[in-house]
Image (cartoon, coloured by chain):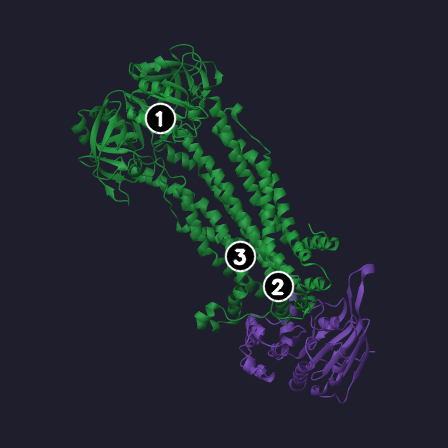
Chain colours: A green, B purple
Amino acid sequence: MSGHPTLRTKLRRDIRRQWPQFAALVLTVLLGVALFVASYDAYRNLRASYAGVFVDQRFADLFVTGGDVDGFARQAATTDGVAAVTTRTQADLPFAVGRDKLLGRVVGYPASGDPAVDRLTLLSGHGLSGPATALVEHHMAEHFGLGPGDTVTVVGAGGPQQLRVVGVVASAEYLWPARSRQDPITSPDDFGVVFAPEATVQALDGATAPNQVLVRLTDAGRPGDLLSQLSATAVSAGATQVLTRDEQPSNALLNEDINGFQEMAVAFPLLFLSAAALSMYVLLTRRVAAERPIIGMLRAQGMRRRTIGLHYLTYGLVAGLTGSTLGVLIGSIGARVLSGYYVRAIDLPAQSAVLVTVRPLTILAGLVFGSGVGALAALAPALLASRVPPAEAMRDEPVAAGHGTTLLERLIPPLRRLPARWRMVLRGADRNRRRTVFTATGMALALILVLVSWTMIDSMNALLHRQFDVVATADAQVELAEPVTSKTLAALMAVADVRTAEPLVQQPVAVVSGGRTYATVLSAFVPRTTMHAFLAPGGRDVALPSDGILVGQSLRSQLGVRPGDEVTLRLPALGRDLRARIAGFVDEPLGTFVYASADWLRSVAGDVPATSALLAYEPGTDPTAVRQAVSAVPGVVAYTDTQALARAWNSYAGLFWVFVLGMLVLGGLMAFAIVFTTMSVNIMERRREIATLRAAGVRHRVLARLITEENLLVALLGVIPGLLLGVAAGAAFLKSFSSDQFTLTLVVRPLTLLLTTLALLLVVWLSQRPGLRALRRMDLAEVVRERTG
Amino acid sequence: MSMAAPATALARLEDVTKVYGTGEAAVYALRGVSLALEPGELVVVLGPSGSGKTTLLNVLGGIEPATSGRVILAGRDLTGMGSDELTDVRRQTLGFVFQFFNLVPTLTAAENVAVVAELTGTPVGDRVGTVLADVGLTDRANHFPGQLSGGQQQRVAIARALVSQPDLLLCDEPTGSLDLVTGRQVLAHLERAARTGGRAVVIVTHNQAIAGMADRVVRMGSGAIVEDVRQPQPVPAAEVTW
């Protein structure tokens, strides 16, 4: 703080005299710091909450499926750095819950006690108490209203078996109930998990030994490359799927999600604090220019340069400190609300939720960022003030020199013949180039903020359209107790609103090439299927090959394969391996699958029965009614609504639009703050010439129109870079979500760009209203006599 | 001591009072001032700081309202007029010249002269060139204010005030920022504006020497006119010295 009492008084009065500008600066810093604290602490809270669950439940570091399970388990158990190893059986089997039929998952669990790896948290009821008892994962329990005493029927190798629900549990593996990496977002109608005694699950799966190994490392074992070594060992032991904790479907998805908070904790403050710094710099530079004679006088009377500099620096520091103090308060509350809401939405076990309100380091960081930005932005004007030469500053210099024709006029000479009002607009924008650049930058920052979220929604809508209207056009998939026959298809097509039905062979598969393996699903369609389109990268529609397979293009990098390469298809359910040529890649938004024609599969693997069927419905069919009708067809044991994800997304669309609106409000506030500040400075600087024009008979609204046109022109200068950077930022944001689970391609609708631009131009128009009102109230008599503007 | 206001006057103040603030803080800038201005006369208003001379000019020009009394300009009573109406009256009747020129720095000399006419859609024909020639700035027409000296800038301001051919030219300390030589040049242009245009020119100044060129000298003190005298033989502006 300035140590000079009179300068402190001046500082207080400066703030009071121009409180709206000061408030705009404080608001911008506040938003930046609040968003930093809220998103960073929410991120930390959620990370800590997940870590708590993982410790409580002894969450596995490695999930190995298939191959020599016992051999690998024994080898892993004796490896240094491994804390515990558990084996179990897991099978995806048809479930019946009341009248609902779905393809669920049954997982083996010790009949008594807890396993060494991946134990469950009991939310209600009690543990397993007999061979026909089950613990239901709580998402499924909530959706179907299941609790102790209810039953779930599992259609296993020996036919349907009723399991009595004895408890409801939470599992770290299903915090987000994802079926697989290829099917990460499932409807609760279509997927649920139950845990049953290991022997019961083996019997249901028709197996005699476990098919999964879960490995938990010691804390000392985690940092090294032990996971890679164990993964390689598992693959060489014939594993069909090896997933690390980071790749585990639920954890991978939640990580993507909460990493978004971390990205927000960087991106939002960066945008807002940049805007605050620009506004602060513009405002203080102007103040120093206006106060040059005063500074000159103070210097002439012996005030030290440092004292002068500190006085202006303090303004920035006060604005930064005020904004960051308020920001830290609001952000801390926001963090708690945000993480609490998230934890409830995920249904995290209550004892694992870590909702820390006050993290001293975050608060300190917020205060340092906010105050630092204030001081940093004030530094250049403060130095400028401290270097003012006293004699020159006190000399009478009523007209600023250095104005001339604009670059545009020099490049396009006819512009010089434009009417005076247009020349004024053009040259007004060129008058203080640095300020023009800052205002345009503010506009660009606001555009980036809005476009990142809006393009995300556009891209998600495009993804769903591509996935469900172009690629996977079937409305439902049913699992049948017996292989599909023409009679079965006829029975399915006899259901009202079912337009057509096709058989489908679907098998879990591990694609193996060059020592690397990728677990996914092989789908074999009728050769001219109408249920699925195969789009090559670039969008070309290709037919199913008569020889070989089509694979998702992410296998190009996952396995290092190219078209024409031969790979091994390991089919654990059939207990055999096939050699197949990659006929081509497909570019699909969701998942990475293997496709073949049923004829080719038959030719290389013999008669593999089709136990699934794909259904297409008439437009406008009621999904619930047709689900019940199809589920009631004899032989149908499970039903999957393949369009449920699209409907789920659409039902959440309102929430996403609220998010976009929120971004629009924040972007608008930012644009408002920066344009309001530059506009105020612009008017302050020009009030004498504006007053003179008014005194000479130019009406207020004519001048207001000129200023509005100038501001809109300056804002428009920021539109093109803002749109380009906004789209680039949107693309980078989407890329961070893309994996073998999702391929999010940026889609930019011209309407989105247009609406964002128009909305922010409206904000610019609004932000100059206070300045224009001040102009109308200006005391002409006083202003025309001022020495400097 | 005020002169009686003739009915043919170009502008008239009738018992005008201007008070700033209220209650104990009230400051009387004008106290019952009456004044009439005739076409073609060059009036110099003199007085020390705080005597009310600038307030008189502002009230006369309609940029400050009178607290009481009447202000008649070109036959129109300004009392009670709205902001837009006052703006129109100023445009149609008045020209202003200020101490600090108040030019738009982004416009050339010619553009500064033309801008008000262009913005208000008032046709000025080729008068922009004429008035710039009148003030001797033809060769500087395309220069920006930053490229002109103080005297040249003030001459641009005079040209700007004259281009709409006002009946009344109001000048507030027009030589206050200028040295003697350039100040004399500016006064000469104002003198010519009064002698050739048939308009009234009012110069407010604290510079006693300028009074020598006036047809009429109005002295103010404590918000009132303390003396209003005609000078039958004013000296030419070129001979004014201080």
Chain letter of the residue carrying label 3? A
Q: Is residue A307 left or right of A423 when viewed as pictured?
A: right
Determine which of the numbered discs, if any, sits on residue A230 in the image. Answer: 1
Disc 1 or 2, which lies upstream in sequence?
Answer: 1
Q: Which residue is rendered at x = 48% and y = 24% of the image?
A: A55
- Give the mark, 3 or 2, whose residue is nearer the N terminus: 3
Based on the displayed image, in which of its 4 quarters is residue A73 positioned?
A: top left
Q: Distance between the Cα atoms at labels 1 and 2?
A: 70 Å
Q: Quadrant of residue A624?
A: top left
Q: In the rendered view of the protein, which quadrant contains the C terminus of chain B?
A: bottom right
Q: Which residue is mark 2?
A: A685
User: How much space separates mark 3 and mark 2, taking CA atoms?
Assistant: 16 Å
Q: Name the quarter where the N terminus of chain B is drawn.
A: bottom right
Q: Residue at x 72, y 53 (%)?
A: A8
Question: Which residue is the site of mark 3?
Answer: A439
Q: Earlier in the sequence, mark 3 or mark 1?
A: 1
The outermost residue toward the top is A130
Vertical placement of A548 versus A402: above or below? above
Q: Which one is nearer the viewer's eye here, B173 or A69?
A: A69
Dot 3 crowding, Cα within 10 Å, few <14, some 14–19, many 20+: many
Instruction: Mark 1 and mark 2 in contact? Answer it, CB < 8 Å.
Output: no
Apparent side of residue A592 relative to residue A411 in the rendered image (left or right): left
Label 3 secondary element: helix
Q: Which of B55 and A10 lies nearest the eye of the viewer?
A: A10
